[in-house]
Image (cartoon, helix red, strand yellow):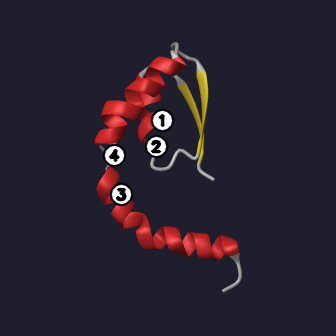
Amino acid sequence: MDDPKQRSLLAWEANADHWDAKFGTDGNDDRKLLIGPTTERLLGLRTRETVLDVACGNGVFARRMTELGALWIRASV
């Protein structure tokens, strides 16, 4: 198989269940206790502010931004 896109897709599919089990819908402790709060503070989101979340993965932080009132545009590339 010489197609890099296909190799990448197959690698992800082989690891997706592990990733979802480890991070769940709310993220792991690093995300909940360190990355999330720090990013929220740095962004200083305001209600109805539009945020582009590139490589949003399973959407943990994107859902949190929505809870904070942001308008969320996402792209997982």
Label 4 and label 2: CA atoms lie apart by 8 Å
Question: Residue 20 — which label?
Answer: 3
Mark 2 lies on residue: 59
The kind of residue on which mark 4 rests is Thr
Residue sitting at x 44%, y 36%: 61
Mark 4 lies on residue: 25
Tell me if residue 3 comes above or below residue 52 in the rendering. below
Q: Earlier in the sequence, mark 3 or mark 1?
A: 3
Q: Earlier in the sequence, mark 4 or mark 3?
A: 3
Label 3 and label 1: CA atoms lie apart by 16 Å
Provide the secondary structure element on which disc 4 rests.
loop
- Confirm or deny contact between disc 3 and disc 1 (CB under 8 A): no
- Confirm or deny contact between disc 4 and disc 3 (CB under 8 A): no
Q: Residue 23, how many percent across, how many down?
A: 34, 50
- Confirm or deny contact between disc 4 and disc 2 (CB under 8 A): no
Is 22 left or right of 51, judged from the image as shown? Answer: left
- Confirm or deny contact between disc 1 and disc 4 (CB under 8 A): no
The kind of residue on which mark 2 rests is Gly
Residue sitting at x 33%, y 46%: 25
Residue sitting at x 53%, y 20%: 43
Label 1 and label 4: CA atoms lie apart by 11 Å
- Confirm or deny contact between disc 1 and disc 2 (CB under 8 A): yes
Provide the secondary structure element on which disc 2 rests.
loop
Mark 1 lies on residue: 62
Quadrant of the frame with the N terminus: bottom right
Q: Earlier in the sequence, mark 3 or mark 2?
A: 3
Q: Residue 49, how many percent across, how many down?
A: 58, 18
The kind of residue on which mark 1 rests is Ala
